Image (cartoon, helix red, strand yellow):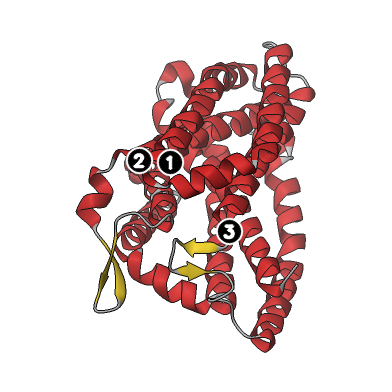
Amino acid sequence: MTAALWGILLLWLIVFIYGIAGSVDFGAGFWAMVFFKERHASAATIANRYLSPLWEVTNVFLVLFAVALVGLFPTAAFVLGNILLVPGDLILILLTIRTVFMVFAHSVDRYQHTLRIVSGITGLVIPALLMTVFPISEGNFLHSVDGRLTLSVPDLFRNQVVYGYVILGITSELFLSALLLGDYSRVAKDESAYRVYRKHVLWLGPVSILSAFLALLSIGRSAAWLQKAMLSQWHWFLASGCFFVIGYVLVITCGWELKRRFRWAVVSIVAQYACAMMGYGRAHLPYFVYPVVTIQDSFTNSEMFRAVIIVLILGIAVLFPGFIWFWRLFLENRAYASKPE
């Protein structure tokens, strides 16, 4: 493997971790808004308890991605920064609003209701905006003005392909978050919340798979080159489908009881998305933005590559023990998970 491929693999790993953690983070905010009524108060409590520590950690990977992208692929960072100016700014604004309400809601009780609404709405809108990056990177909606690529925002939001990606992103987010919150309910020994989330997992799973097929069909109309490349990576998508079947069967066989194998269902579904992202990523190579920016052309020099890799390794080495401590203190700690409100 070339240095550029190692660099893009590192970016893929950061994006994957952020995608999983962000799905649970944003999804928990949505479920907390939906289940705040008395009938599903237990499910809302679980979502809020999961969300409370998680939102502070998730954005670490967004920062790591920005550092790695600018350090390893500066040309691609410049082009992406230009064409993603509008959706990127919207995402940052919404993240700021969400974060502000998170901070104030933990200090002032009167912000709790507003937080539920803001967190729930942004929990759908932010992932939807993030998913627009995929069709943009496929070379759609871009125009060259004075030698510089610009994004046609009206064309972006009028195109059906974009909404295929958006639906896929939202259904996947809700599916993953319901699955993780179901497992968290198992840790907390909260049967009521577990049954609520398991019920939603059972219908969101097939819906997410259907939305993935629809997105694949829509890619053929806007980026035939990518659809052809994805078909050549069929083994990754076959593995993804197998992991989905295994995870879904495990969820079904768990029934309404709190069983340990529900955790293995979570592992299997995470593996499903890892394989799907690997297949898509390999099909997208060698382009960052089709057909003008490739990973090789935008790659930094060898000295900068070594410096960035060393800095990232040191940063991850410092952060990793903290993540382990965070996991044991909040996500695997039954005392915290089941504490009364």
Nearer to me, 13 or 45? 13
Looking at numbered disc 2 in the image, what kind of residue is underneath it?
Val
Q: Earlier in the sequence, mark 2 or mark 3?
A: 2
Q: Is residue 188 visible?
A: no
Q: Secondary structure at mark 1?
A: helix
Identify the residue at image location x=43%, y=19%.
38
User: Few, some or many C-alpha atoms within 10 Å of disc 3 (few <14, some 14-19, many ≥20)?
Assistant: some
Task: Tell me which corner region of the image, top left, top right, bottom left or bottom right, holds residue 115.
Answer: top left
Nearer to me, 156 or 121? 156
**Residue underneath mark 2:** 161
Image side of residue 39 versus residue 236, left or right: left
Looking at the picture, how far across and down is residue 270, in whole percent?
67, 38
Point out the frontmost of discs 2 and 1: 1
Q: Secondary structure at mark 3?
A: loop
Looking at the picture, how far across and down is residue 23, in whole percent?
53, 42
182 over 73 or under it: above or below: above
Q: Disc 2 and disc 3: Cα gap in Å?
A: 20 Å
Total marks shown come to 3
- Contact, CB < 8 Å: mark 3 with mark 1? no
User: Few, some or many C-alpha atoms within 10 Å of disc 1 (few <14, some 14-19, many ≥20)?
Assistant: many
Looking at numbered disc 1 in the image, what kind of residue is underneath it?
Ile
Q: Disc 3 and disc 1: Cα gap in Å?
A: 16 Å
Looking at the picture, how far across and down is residue 179, in whole percent?
61, 29
**Residue underneath mark 1:** 219
**Residue underneath mark 3:** 285
Identify the residue at image location x=77%, y=19%.
259
Identify the residue at image location x=66%, y=29%.
241
